[in-house]
Image: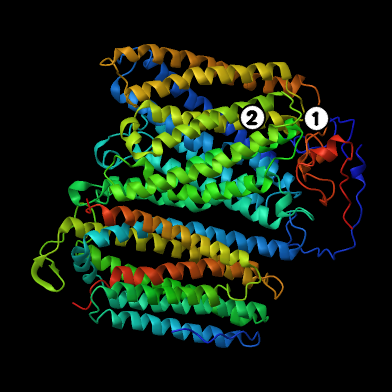
Amino acid sequence: MSAPSDHSKSSPLTTYFTVWVALLCGTFLTYEVAKIDLGPWNAAVALTIASAKALLVALFFMHIKGAHERLLKLVVITTIAFLIILLSLSMADYATRLWS
Amino acid sequence: MSDSQIVVETASHAEVHNPALQHQFAEPQQQRDAASLGMWIFLATEVMFFGGLFCAYLIYRTWYFSDFAAASTSINAALGGANTAVLICSSLTVVLAIWAAQTSRRSLMLLMLVLTMLFGCAFLGIKGVEYHDKFVEHHVPGASFSFEHEEIPGHPGQYANPHHAEIFFALYFIMTGLHALHMIVGLGIFTWLLWMAWKRRFTPEYYTPLEIGGLYWHFVDIIWIYLFPLLYLIDRHK
Amino acid sequence: MATAIAQPVERTNYLNNEYGVKSWLLTTDHKRIALLYLISITFFFFIGGFFALLIRLELLTPAGDLVQADTYNKLFTMHGMVMIFFFLIPSIPAVLGNFLVPMMIGAKDLAFPRINLLSWYLYIIGAAIMLHCILTGGVDTGWTFYTPFSTEYTNTKIIEAGLGIFIAGFSSILTGLNFVVTIHRMRCPGMTWSRLPLFIWAHYATSIIQILGTPVIAITLLLVVAERALHLGIFDPKLGGDPLLFQHLFWFYSHPAVYIMILPSMGVVSEIIACFARKRIFGYSFVAFSSIAIAVFGFLVWAHHMFVAGISVYAALVFSLLSYAVAVPSAVKVFNWTATLYKGSIHYDAPMLYAFGFLGLFTIGGLTGLFLASLGVDIHVHDTYFVVAHFHYIMVGGALMGYLGGMHFWWPKISGRLYPEGWARLAALIVFIGFNLTFFPQFILGYLGMPRRFYDYSHMPEFQILNVFSTAGATILGVGYLLPMIYFLWSMRYGKPAPDNPWNAAGLEWKTASPPPTFNFDEEPVVTWEAYNYDEIDTGHKQEVEVVG
């Protein structure tokens, strides 16, 4: 679920309230989907919804969307990239320990 | 004496003698941009700080999935969900407070700041209830921890390994506890922002502390957005 | 603009514009904060050096006859912790970086001067806790804090040491944050990214590592403290925990940490070589981007410290490959510095002697890193003196040489005095000889199988002769380090007053007085020339700092 992109400076309020509703719906959705058995996909779905919510907060509440500089986006992307490095390279060890 | 002692009065850019302009900056926009970048970089450090915990969590959840599921079932997902909603509402009030500052709506700004703090307190209150429940059930890691005869969801008759469950609770308390600590710091920051707003320090031209305080608050919200499904919703369908 | 007559003692500068303890302890002037750091880290250098002395004395004889085994464990642990966290990691960034970064980009101060002061206080608090820990028994786990020994079995002061390092870590984070924001937001007009001194590029890269890496060791230490206090089981195999998880989290920071220690030194070397070869650094862009590359690649290789710890061999293969890759940007720098020297007009002043030392010793240290990156070889040399020699070649032969070279190069700017050049060259030579005598035998010792962290090697008495060489070298090295301490202090009173630009060097910091005024420049510089414009400087085209407006 994503909020409609509202660039008009005259109604940031609409954007804020739309995002707020989207976030609450996402929370509700997360809670309900958790009760359905999707096998191994439960975690993936939950994290996808969480990431979508985080993206909404970052883009619209933290004003990354509309930030005139690419620097802030670079900071965010770099940070996420290094977090992924930590998680994935560690998992590379744990996931393959039993192979040999 | 060096000829550089001759100071030429520069008339090319209008120097705003803003008392809020610090001496190392040439103009207010530079100061604003520096503050914003500084806060974003600080948030980057916070992401990596929590990231280490997420790494530990990821590994142990993979290793001990059933034990983690059993432990996760014993914490109150409804309260966790309620807390998520509370934080989302608080993020809304934060952006509304900033909008109010931008549009010179002082009363609204003060109201939104107070509401934000109330939501924050509500979050901590609900957290307190949760922690109390865990304490009563002896699920707090340490000397009095006990997790005997807890069934693994979906596998009646099979019981979770208490040691592995203790790791779950250790991570649960450390991650939510650290998050709550950040929340408390956030409340402190907003108390200060509220005081500044009350003292009429914020104008449509200068509300930088609100902005960067808001960034911090939203970050705390985002961390919780991830903590909720990871900690509270493992195998809830079983 | 550089004045011919400089009388720093009489002009108002950052040292004499205000007197009194409060004016120093509550300063927000980046230059004064740099000096506060200088005093603090020098103090800890002595403490770390003292432990090194005791280690080398013990190893003079094969028998463990100077101290007990537990004490020896504490000696090498405290030596490592103090040198790494309280000397090397702050050293260049907190002293030279703090002093020079604003000046090199034409700014009046860092972006956040009060956070800069906070950084120093956090360092002091962390350092005080560490000092207390040392004085009340210390820690014996090795600076690496491996679990479950550190969380479960040792009865030394882990929590205190962990807290001290945790707090000092925030000092490092805030310094990095300050530098990144400053370099992005406070460059003077005309100072484009491609005109930045390579010292700035090096500190930018270092700051990225400090920002992204340090928080991970912070949380790791917190977990160790929690585990130790509450017996949680996160790292305890008896309770289902994985000791290797600690190692992954620990080394995720601690490997990039070594790049925090070396990158600033590389920045210093670039400045020195350009000045004393009177040439623009060859391949400026390559050197600049290699700093960023080192910072990024440095985060991808941490498990090469864990090859024999029990990680998956497939993961080990990946990390081994990546560890070879991380050597490439460093090699790029060495080639470019060497190319800079070619057809340069070389001057052998003390800073340049340190830079030459760096070139050779860092190369040796780096090449021996490749030995360690190879899985097959590492099995044999892991946890031997080969590793010890490798990292001391980089940390001491590399980072510390760069630090000393930088201190000599910028001493006139910092203090307004010239140090005695003859003594400085002698000291550099003594350091070089002492260093090689100390650490080269250790490569041989390690290759022959002498384990590290052993206080008694009486089952291998044939190693004594090399150990004796090493200890002799350490004594010579100690003398080499003491000399600059003495003559720098001497110069503050008796040294010749320094002109604005004693080296005729390029760089904005040389265009203001020695010592500089509190706000660095009398008016904001406007840069219209490229970095390292030595050809213009030496042919007499003095670059005028244009007046704004």
Local packing at callout 1 (Cα closer than 10 Å; few below 14, some 14-19, many 20+) is some
Instruction: Please give the chain letter of the residue carrying mark 1.
Output: C
- Residue C25 visible here: no
Q: Secondary structure at mark 2?
A: helix
Residue B93 in the image: x percent, y percent?
52, 79
* Amino acid type, callout 1: Pro
Q: Secondary structure at mark 1?
A: loop
Residue B176 in the image: x percent, y percent?
35, 63
Q: How far apart, in angstroms, are the residues tagged by discs 1 and 2?
A: 18 Å
Q: How many marks?
A: 2
Query: Who is closer to the viewer here, A81 or C247?
Result: A81
- Residue C476 visible here: yes
- Location of the N terminus of chain C by quadrant is top right
The residue where tag 2 is placed is C355
Q: Give the residue at x 43% y 59%.
A: A83
Query: In the shown orientation, is residue B101 left or right of residue B146?
Result: right
Considering every residue shown, the one lying at the far left of the view is B157
Residue C130, relative to residue C527: is it above or below?
A: above
Residue B94 in the image: x percent, y percent?
54, 75
Please give the label number shown on residue C502.
1
Res A30 → quadrant: bottom left
Residue C166, relative to residue B61: is it above or below?
A: above
Q: Give the residue at x 68% y 27%.
A: C352
Res B130 → quadrant: bottom left
